[in-house]
Amino acid sequence: MAVPKYFVLNDGNRVPSIGLGTFQGDEDNSKVKEAVKLALKLGYRHIDGASAYGNEKEIGQGIKESGVPREEIFVTSKLPQTAHAPGSVEKALSQTLKDADLDYVDLYLMHFPHAYKADEDLRTIRHASGNGKPVIDYELSRNYTSTWKAMEALVKTGRVRSIGLSNFNILKTKNLLSAAEIVPAVNQVELHPYLPQNELLEFSRQHGILLMAHQPLGGRPVGVVRAHAEIPRPIDDPTLITTASRLGKSTAQIALSWAVQKGIPVVPKSIQEHHLSQNLQLFQLCDTDFRSIEDLSSQRGPVRFLDPSPHIGFNIFDEENDQPTADRAPWD
């Protein structure tokens, strides 16, 4: 049995169940354009990008050179953490559209709930000590609802079709909903067999928000925000290896099929044609196989690979306190 090809957002727009993630981590962006072209040639119709990835020009070039009509492609971008001031939100979107040579994006997400101090060109201001850490804008990091209000205004311009969140937990989403006129269409979060995010998934469904999985194969974020580097990724888990071998599939296909079967669109990253092609071939797992993957997190404990707290000085995923609660980092 096939898994869904699309999911319908709360505003009626549709997002493909699988897209191409373009974040290159600690690698450079030299292969992004060709990856986008190849993915579109193979049949991908969702390209997931972000201002912070530094590759929106390459994404735009790949889209243009693919020959696939723009209206057939779902393009996601994300508001950088340097543009959370309400007056900077439209400026950041304009830069994204200019870089990608697009008239609009289909989905625009607030990349993180916390904000950085920025210069006039929206570049991150770094700590004066030279430690490389960003200077946090504590007021805006607590006032993400004002950023959301500015994002809501973008919808009326026609330059974004849908708006949403990324890396928001339940507490922060609740707070945002209390002030929102437009309910976020999507919350893109780390989600994989070691971090199924079931409580957030249930909360999101109750409020009409579609969870989308970044790092659906297990996380390899940039080094400064990478946690549990010593733990193998879920696609190297013995349960997935055994299941994949028995079914004649890859462990990536197993992990992605599990997520889409849960009702979660995914945006895995790859630049290799073999993997890009395989990742499109998703399928319905039987109940036993689905449950064996679903149970991995409870058996071993949840593993979050993306953890910016050592880099910024507070825990954005705290469900008890809406952090930051202080106005200083430990290194200030």
Image (tube, rainbow, N blue to C red):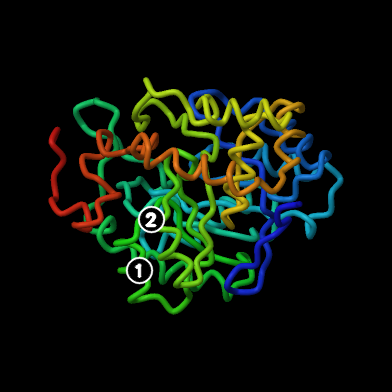
Which quarter of the rendering shows the C terminus?
top left
Which mark, by number, is residue 176?
Answer: 1
222 shown above or below 170: above
Asked whether, in this view, residue 110 is left or right of residue 250, the answer is left
Which of 295/54 is in front? 295
- Residue located 47% across and 29% down the image: 220
- Residue located 30% across and 69% down the image: 175
Say whether marks 1 and 2 touch (CB < 8 Å). Answer: yes
Q: How many marks?
A: 2
Which mark, by number, is residue 116?
Answer: none
Place of residue 201 in the rendered image (x, y in percent of width and height, measured from the top left): 45, 59
Which of 126/286 is in front? 286
Quarter of the image where one finds residue 126: top left
Quarter of the image where one finds residue 29: top right
18 shown above or below 268: below
Place of residue 32 in the rendered image (x, y in percent of width and height, measured from the top left): 66, 32
In primary-sequence order, the first of circles 1 and 2 is 2
Asked whether, in this view, residue 90 is left or right of residue 136, the answer is right
Place of residue 53 in the rendered image (x, y in percent of width and height, measured from the top left): 52, 38
Neighbours of disc 2 within 10 Å: few (<14), some (14-19), many (20+)? many
Which of 216/77 is in front? 216
Place of residue 255 in the rendered image (x, y in percent of width and height, measured from the top left): 58, 38
Which of 112/18 is in front? 18
Label 2 SS: loop
Give the CA separation, mark 1 to mark 2.
10 Å
For the residue marked with disc 2, what is the amino acid?
Phe
Label 1 SS: helix
For the residue marked with disc 1, what is the amino acid?
Leu
Which residue matches tag 2? 168
